[in-house]
Image (cartoon, grey):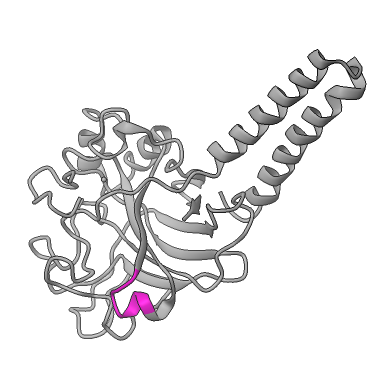
Amino acid sequence: MRSDHADGPDEHDRGLSHDLPVLARRRMIRLMAGAGLIPLVGCTSEASETSGKAAGGAASAAAEECAAIPEETAGPFPGDGSNGVNVLKESGVVRSDIRSSFGDSAGGTAEGVPLTVTLTVVDAAGDCGTPREGAAVYVWHCDREGDYSLYSEGATEENWLRGVQETDAKGQVTFTTVFPGCYPGRWPHIHFEVYGSLADATAATGITSTSQLAFPRDVCERVYKTDGYRESGVHLRSLSIETDTVFSDGHDRQLATVEGSPQAGFTAALVVPV
């Protein structure tokens, strides 16, 4: 297991709907191009071999694009009952705006640059074009100072920056939050768990996939120049996503597409094949 926090325990720690038709069109173009080689070069054995290789290459590319999201550890601060505290069974955890604490917590609100995160859960067993409607996603992350609710000193009575939603007909969930900070030893990220259903998620059982979303360096650098993120900027300068303990083995399928500005806020999107 890989550690999520430099000084924390390690036993729990490894886009959007418009992307789907684009991917589908790209796959179709590849397949049509492969099939179209035969009339272009004639009905020879060489042409057939070439066509077969092209079609095979297209199928391989499609399979690669549709690989399941990499499995990662939940980190030392999941709050899912796996290491004591369990926020998933608390009333109010099903919500889209996760900036404030809920239920019997202390009632605090996490401050920071506004961020909207959309995860699109799709079926990896097919061609990634089939949305997983009725699944559930639990997300959590640190605040701009690198602290986690329920665990970090001064935040143990809070449960902000945690929430669950059920995927819609497009396989999507969208959360309103703040841009996470960067703490020593870890690249900026958001944790998430995918469950088979909302009932499974709120019962903290039946996890389908556990993974993490990563942010591009240029976006992080822009955010970390704003008020409240000074320490994050310092930590980021000594890190790289290529050497991060979680993302070092490949992050292409976990790197979010991010747009926006520190003034207007950012949107982050990631397709999650499971």
Write the residue at 79% across / 13% down.
46
**Magenta stretch holds residue 103:** no
Q: Residue at x 50, y 65 (%)?
A: 173
For residue 68, side relative to residue 180 (left or right): right
Decide if residue 29 is on the left or right side of residue 69: right
Q: Which residues are magenta?
A: 200-206
Viewer-proximal residue among 272 and 105: 272
Is residue 42 rendered to the left or right of residue 3? Answer: right
Q: Within the image, what quadrant is residue 252 found in? A: top left
Please indicate, yes or no, whether residue 89 appears anywhere in the rendered image. Answer: yes
- Which residue corresponds to the image point at 15% horizontal and 47% vertical from the top-left? 5
Q: Is residue 93 visible?
A: no
Q: Position of residue 55 (x, y in %)?
A: 71, 30
Q: Is residue 264 above or below residue 240?
A: below
Residue 72, given in percent of the width and then of the height, sits at: 29, 48
| Quadrant of the image occupied by residue 210 | bottom left
Q: Which residue is drawn at the image coordinates 34% and 83% (left, top)?
A: 92
Q: Magenta includes 204?
A: yes
Q: Position of residue 250 (x, y in %)?
A: 37, 33
Q: Number of labelled discs?
A: 0
